Amino acid sequence: MFHHVAPRPRNAGATRAAILAAARERFAQESYDDVGLRDIAGDVGVDAALVSRYFGSKEDLFTAVLDSCENGATLMEGDRSSFGERVAREAIDEARGGSRLRGLLILLRSVGSTRAMELVQRTGAERFLNPFADWVGGPDAAVRARLAAALVMGMAVSREITGGFAMTPGECERMRDRMAALLQDIIDG
């Protein structure tokens, strides 16, 4: 017997966007290997066949999710002189909930999956590191971009491993200020 879900309005664009949003949430909360197309379909209230029709395989959907995330584009928004402060605030103060660094969470959740890492590594440089290095510019741009990205990723890993920072608001503020100064120093070269 089939479980009946309320039919969604027949708006292909809205349905596709809803599937993508549900997949983004799933991949940010669970590892790649633990996420199934049926789970995502259930979150949206559509049949799994519809997810396949719009996105193809799970690999194709995962790639679409990576493409749909800002993937660090927010790191390059705004003035260079406020880069460190902006990104440190994002990494520490705004880390929980609706983080704009969702792409990073997806990468962290999927790091144990050989297939997900193949997909990430195939396009990671062109999707994020190369544009970021171009934005950083100047001497050793690629080196400085890698260092800044590693600092942000390291902070995210630290936060995820411990389920938060478990620090006082004052300690978090001092950590944010120090991280901001380090990031700005890396970017300024």
Image (cartoon, helix red, strand yellow):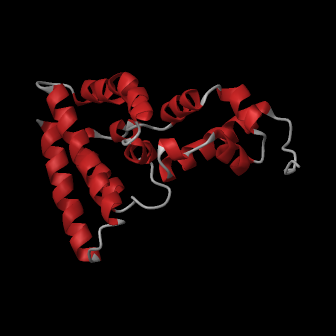
Q: Quadrant of residue 163?
A: bottom left
Q: Does residue 133 appear left or right of residue 127 in this picture?
A: left
- Tell me the residue at 32%/60% (across/down): 161
Q: Does residue 122 appear left or right of residue 166 in this picture?
A: right
Residue 141 location (% of width, % of height): 17, 27
Q: Nearer the viewer, residue 110 or 81?
A: 110
Residue 139 location (% of width, % of height): 11, 24
Q: Nearer the viewer, residue 25 or 72?
A: 25
Q: Is residue 28 above or below residue 61?
A: below
Residue 188 location (% of width, % of height): 14, 38
Q: Quadrant of the C terminus?
A: top left
Q: Quadrant of residue 129?
A: top left
- Tell me the residue at 49%/42% (across/down): 32
Q: Does residue 130 appear left or right of residue 140 in this picture?
A: right
Q: Quadrant of residue 111?
A: top left
Residue 172 location (% of width, % of height): 26, 69
Q: Is residue 147 above or below residue 88?
A: above
- Tell me the residue at 28%/28% (across/down): 135
Q: Does residue 16 appear left or right of residue 128 in this picture?
A: right
- Which residue occupies the extreme front position in the image? 1
- Tell me the residue at 86%/36% (across/down): 10
